[in-house]
Image (cartoon, grey):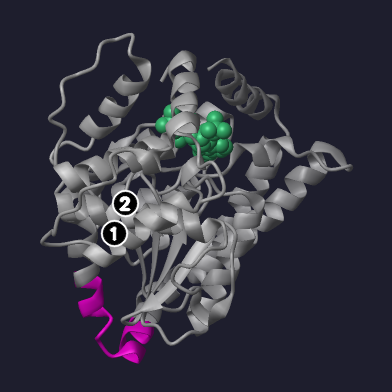
């Protein structure tokens, strides 16, 4: 979106607010959230205090229209009608998404925004509250949701700590399977690049050392996780959210999800044990296309290469994938955990060694000019928009 369109969209939100956008009619839908949950989400939206950002507001608008009217049937606004064009584009981008699914995504999105403000949402497992995650436990499944939709769920330093903590709790809670997914349209955009801009007193070296230790603990939490671990990849996945997938036991993806590890573009190198797991999963050539040459895979390609277990249509992704997982979660828990241990134990030591080597390399990369220039150009490009 151009700067002008963004500025106008901002003005449109300030003047009217999405809650006022024809939120008058509701229908009864065959699947997704209930009528009451939808009404509740609409109320929550009008009580949000923080501005969620233009992209999220446009998503809210589009999901509401799709849920209540179905696929975009409005005439395309003229090129200079920036605000209505941005709204129309957002609605149109949902294509033929089923109305019930749009209503469910709408409720999820508002729920995650409310949770981020400390409002009511599913309570975290064991009662712990997080700023950048939402955690819920039900039907034998603990779900950890990356919950910074306005930043495409990029992982901040705090969020790394929260995920390590949430994994520790999930390992100990009564659930059978642990699931990661993302709030909003992204699964996760990887490491939050602003982590590199917060230079401590000890300088870049200290930043790299602290970052390295945090990364080591983060990846270790995945290597050592004792229960079946699944990813519900609801949209694009970037960087470390992709590289750790080699340690997941199941990766279910919606058909429009993508998988991207642009390390060399950022002057960096692979992590999450991907330098070991990716060649094992897909062979050196295909792994190199991803890890060295930044090739972005579609869900279908990732499935063909074995990184993704199964792909589902966008319109029914969550309901189909969850109903499979809920079935799995009814299997005997000890049998599942012990079988996972058998499958993984042979490579655990190796994974820890790979993690150490990757962290060492990255600590060096983070202090390099190549990395510095790449991060600066990301933020400079943003500043120009
Ligand atoms: N680190 C920091 N901020 C990020 C981010 C990341 N990894 N991913 C997204 N964001 C922020 C953007 O800066 C933007 O913030 P703003 O609203 O304050 O400007 C917001 O999230 C929305 O992202 P935006 O870039 O406007 O959305 P988009 O749809 O045009 O592009 C991405 C989405 C993910 C393709 C793009 O943000 C991107 O390339 N991010 C970096 C991904 C990356 O390199 N990750 C590390 C891999 S090793």
Residues at discs 1 and 2 in contact (Cβ within 8 Å): yes
Q: Is residue 207 left or right of residue 359?
A: right
What's the magenta bit mostly, secondary-structure-wise?
A: helix
Question: Is 269 situated above or below 328?
Answer: above
Disc 2 marks which residue?
A: 106
Residue positioned 41% across, 20% down in the render? 1
> In whole angstroms, how far apart are the C-alphas of marks 1 and 2?
8 Å
Tell me, yes or no, if residue 278 can be seen here.
Answer: yes
Q: Which residues are magenta?
A: 324-339
Q: Secondary structure at mark 1?
A: helix
Q: Which mark is residue 38?
A: 1
Q: Foreground mark, 1 or 2? A: 1
The x and y percentages for residue 373 are 65, 22
Which mark is on residue 27?
Answer: none
Q: Is residue 276 above or below residue 371?
A: below
Percent position (x, y) of residue 125?
Answer: 49, 78
Q: Name the N-terminal-most of marks 1 and 2.
A: 1
Give the residue furthest to the front: 24
What residue appears at the point 77 percent right and 44 percent down from the top-left corner? 207
Q: Residues within 10 Å of mark 2 (few under 14, many from 20)?
A: many
Give SS at disc 2: helix
- Horizontal and vertical percent position of residue 57: 41, 38
In terms of depth relative to the viewer, which is nearer, 354 or 29? 29
């Amino acid at each position: 979106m151009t700067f002008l369109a963004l500025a106008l969209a901002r003005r449109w939100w300030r003047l009217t607010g999405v809650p006022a956008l024809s939120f008058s009619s509701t229908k009864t839908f065959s699947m997704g959230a209930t009528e009451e949950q939808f009404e509740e989400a609409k109320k929550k939206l009008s009580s949000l205090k923080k501005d969620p950002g233009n992209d999220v507001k446009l998503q809210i608008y589009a999901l509401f229209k799709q849920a209540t009217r179905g696929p975009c049937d409005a005439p395309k606004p003229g090129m200079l009608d920036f605000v209505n064009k941005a709204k129309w584009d957002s609605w149109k981008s949902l294509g033929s998404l089923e109305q019930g699914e749009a209503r469910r995504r709408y409720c999820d999105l508002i729920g995650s925004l409310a949770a981020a403000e400390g409002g009511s949402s599913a309570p975290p497992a064991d009662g712990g509250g997080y700023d950048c995650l939402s955690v819920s436990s039900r039907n034998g499944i603990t779900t950890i949701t990356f919950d910074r939709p306005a930043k495409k769920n990029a992982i901040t330093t705090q969020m790394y700590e929260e995920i390590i903590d949430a994994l520790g709790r999930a390992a100990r809670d009564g659930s059978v399977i642990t699931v990661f997914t993302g709030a909003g349209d992204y699964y996760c955009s990887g490491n939050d690049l602003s982590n590199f801009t917060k230079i401590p007193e000890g300088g870049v070296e200290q930043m790299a050392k602290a970052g390295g230790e945090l990364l080591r603990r983060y990846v270790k939490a995945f290597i050592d996780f004792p229960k079946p671990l699944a990813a519900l990849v609801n949209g694009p996945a970037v960087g470390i959210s992709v590289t750790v997938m080699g340690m997941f036991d199941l990766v279910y993806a919606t058909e429009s999800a993508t998988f991207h590890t642009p390390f060399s573009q950022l002057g960096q190198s692979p992590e999450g044990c991907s330098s070991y797991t990716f060649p094992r999963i897909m062979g050196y050539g295909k792994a190199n296309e991803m890890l060295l040459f930044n090739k972005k895979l579609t869900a279908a390609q990732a499935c063909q290469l074995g990184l993704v277990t199964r792909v589902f249509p966008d319109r029914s992704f969550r309901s189909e994938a969850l109903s499979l997982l809920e079935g799995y979660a009814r299997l005997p828990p000890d049998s599942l955990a012990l079988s996972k241990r058998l499958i993984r134990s042979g490579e655990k030591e190796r994974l820890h060694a790979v993690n150490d080597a990757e962290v060492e390399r990255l600590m060096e990369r983070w202090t390099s000019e190549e990395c510095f220039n790449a991060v600066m150009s990301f933020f400079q490009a943003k500043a120009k928009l």
